[in-house]
Amino acid sequence: MFKQGDTVIYGVNGVCRVDGLTQMDITGEKKDYYVLKPVFNGRSTLFVPTDNEVLTGRMRPLITEAGIRELAKKFSKLEPLWIEDEDERKARCAAALVDNDRETALALIKAIRIHRDRQSDIGKKLHVADERFLKDAEKLLREEASFVLDLDFDRVLPFLNEKARAV
C-alpha cells in the first residue's frame, strides 16, 4: 500500500508523487483511488483504483542511486535484444515500458540504436514504432535517474555514460 508523499514509477507516465487517496463514483459504486501527480508533467493527475491489482502493480518504487549506477555499468556489457518479428518487438517494447522492466528496456534500447545506425548507413529510417519506443524508454529512464540522483535532466546521459565507461 502506498501512502501520500510516496514517489513511484507508474508505467509509461514516469515518476509520480502519490498525492493522496480519494473516493470516486465512476461505475455506480464508490471506490478508493490513488491520486498520482506526474513529477515532470505538473498538468496531469492520474487516478488509480486501489482494488485493481493490474494497475496498482504498475506503481513501483523508484530505483535506488546504487541501482542506477549498477544499470549504467551493465549497459556496456548488456547484450542487445533485437527481435526480428515487428509485432513481437512492439509487444516486448510496450511490456518493458508498462512493467518498468529496466534491464529489458536497456537491452531493447541498445538493439534499436544499433539497428537505427545500420538503417542510417544504408539511407533508411527507423520504423516509427521503434523510434517511439526509443524516445519513450530513454525519457522514462532519464526522468527516474534525474529525480533519484537530483541531476538536471540534460546531465543524466553524460553521467550514465561516465559510469558505464568506468567499468
Image (spheres, rainbow, N blue to C red):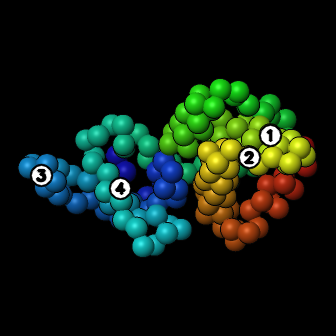
Tag in front: 2 or 1: 2
Report how far apart the C-alphas of labels 2 and 4 lie in the structure. 42 Å
Task: Give the residue at the far left of this rendering.
Answer: 28
* Picture coordinates of residue 118, whole percent (x, y): 86, 41
Are discs 2 and 4 less than 8 Å apart at CB?
no
Answer with the quarter of the image where residue 109 lies. Answer: top right
For mark 1, give the secondary structure.
helix
Q: Could you tell me how far apart the alpha carbons at marks 4 and 3 are, in whole angstroms?
A: 20 Å
The amino acid type found where label 3 is placed reads Lys
Which one is earlier in the sequence, the residue at label 3 or at label 2?
Answer: 3
* Dot 2 amino acid type: Leu
The residue labelled by disc 2 is 126
Please, is residue 89 above or below residue 164 in the view?
above
Q: What residue is shown at x 56% (from left), y 43% (from top)? A: 97
Give the image quarter of residue 83: top right
Q: Mark 1 or 4, which is nearer the eye?
A: 1
Along the line of sight, which residue is nearer the eye, 114 or 3? 114
Check contact, mark 4 vs mark 3: CB within 8 A. Answer: no
Q: Are marks 2 and 1 in contact (CB under 8 Å)?
A: yes
Mark positioned earlier in the residue sequence (2 or 4): 4
Q: Which residue is mark 3?
A: 30
The three-letter amino acid code for the residue at tag 4 is: Lys
Q: Work out whether mark 2 precedes mark 1 in sequence or the reverse, and give the earlier one.
A: 1
Could you say which disc has been placed on residue 115 in the image?
1
Mark 2 or 4, closer to the camera: 2
**Residue 158, which numbered label?**
none
Q: Which mark is residue 3?
A: 4
Q: Position of residue 60 (x, y in %)?
A: 48, 46
Quote the CA–CA distance across marks 3 and 2.
46 Å
As helix, strand or loop, the secondary structure at mark 3 comes to strand
Give the mark nearest the N terminus, 1 or 4.
Answer: 4
Element at label 2:
loop
